[in-house]
């Protein structure tokens, strides 16, 4: 099974995608996470990507398409989180899948309203060691700044600052939202309300996968 999870920043793709991938035996491929690891490692790719990420823009298509290509055809189904991010990437994905005789089984679009997205992104904190996500108001750790799971220090992503959040949401509207029209006539397309509670969204996603 190959699945796309797409929607605006802050809608919960990463959090929900991790749970779904585990429940359905898929490999979660989150281009944002892969790019952040490259930045952290200081690789040439990471150095190229960093300026785009810091500004809230998209990293060039060739870079991210290459990251996906190297993961296709490995035998396990993929849950793509954060890719494709524009129509050119969607077209590249379609031809890569076709060349591996694979297809998209689900394209799930998650949405939530603008104010909710800003609130979620601006309060988001992440564990430096295990990557677990928190929110200062909605899902705080037991001890401020410390991960409940592993005791690691929590940090705020550089691009979760107010100014970059505004830019990321604008880039989403301009470049990623056109994917709704691109995919919505396909039988694999499903829409899920990402504005509900964590559990309600997860249940709706499971239904969208199983239908
Ligand atoms: P995310 O973790 O999905 O919010 O992604 C963080 C940042 O990584 C984005 O703001 C982009 O700069 C970059 N990025 C992630 N996925 C893609 C993609 N498919 N195409 C271009 N840039 C991406």
Image: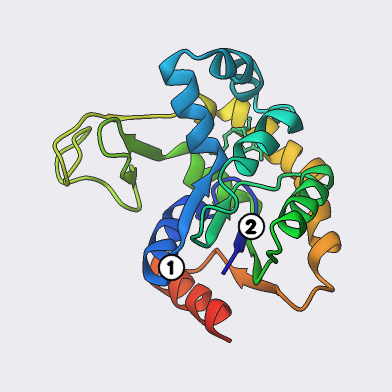
Q: Which of the numbered marks, if any, corresponds to residue 113?
A: 2
Q: Residue at x 33, y 45 (%)?
A: 134
Q: Mark 1, residues whose alpha carbon is within 10 Å: few (<14), some, or many (≥20)?
A: few
Name of the residue lying farthest toward the bottom: 211
**Of the pair 34 and 168, the residue shown nearer to us:** 34
- Can residue 112 be seen here? The reply is no
Ligand 1 positioned in quadrant: top right
Indicate if the residue with disc 2 has its beta carbon within 8 Å of ligand 1.
no
- In the rendered image of this protein, does residue 204 appear above or below residue 88? below
Q: Which residue is mark 1?
A: 197
Q: Earlier in the sequence, mark 1 or mark 2?
A: 2
The reply to whether the C-beta atoms of the residues labelled 1 and 2 are less than 8 Å apart is no
In this rendering, position of residue 96 left or right of residue 75: right
- In the rendered image of this protein, does residue 7 appear above or below residue 167? below
In this rendering, position of residue 127 left or right of residue 102: left
Q: Residue at x 31, y 52 (%)?
A: 139
**Of the pair 111 and 70, the residue shown nearer to us:** 70
Q: Residue at x 64, y 50 (%)?
A: 8
What kind of element bears circle 1? loop
Residue 107, x across and y down, in percent? 67, 66
Distance between mark 1 and mark 2 Cα atoms: 14 Å
Quadrant in the rendering for residue 103? bottom right
Residue 56, x across and y down, in percent? 65, 27
Q: Quadrant of the N terminus?
A: bottom right
Indicate if the residue with disc 1 has its beta carbon within 8 Å of ligand 1.
no
Residue 142, x across and y down, in percent? 15, 46
Quadrant in the rendering for residue 183? bottom right
Colour mode of the rendering: rainbow
Q: Quadrant of the C terminus?
A: bottom right
């Amino acid at each position: 099974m190959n699945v796309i999870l797409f929607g605006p920043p802050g809608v919960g793709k990463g959090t929900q995608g991790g749970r779904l991938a585990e429940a359905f035996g898929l490999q979660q491929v989150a281009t944002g996470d892969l790019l952040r690891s490259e930045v952290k490692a200081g690789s040439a790719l990471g150095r190229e990507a960093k300026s785009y990420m810091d500004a809230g823009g998209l990293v060039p298509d060739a870079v991210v398409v290459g990251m996906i290509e190297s993961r296709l055809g490995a035998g396990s189904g993929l849950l793509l989180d954060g890719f494709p991010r524009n129509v050119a990437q969607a077209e590249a994905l379609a031809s890569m899948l076709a060349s591996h005789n694979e297809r998209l089984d689900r394209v799930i679009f998650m949405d939530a309203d603008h104010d909710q997205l800003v609130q979620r992104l601006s309060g988001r904190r992440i564990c430096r060691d295990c990557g677990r996500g928190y929110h200062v108001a909605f899902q705080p750790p037991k001890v401020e700044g410390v991960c409940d799971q592993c005791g690691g220090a929590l940090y705020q992503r550089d691009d979760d600052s107010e100014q970059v959040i505004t830019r990321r949401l604008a880039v989403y509207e301009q470049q990623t939202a056109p994917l709704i029209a691109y995919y919505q006539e396909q039988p694999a397309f499903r829409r899920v309300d990402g504005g509900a509670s964590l559990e309600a969204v997860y249940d709706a996603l499971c239904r969208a996968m199983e239908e």
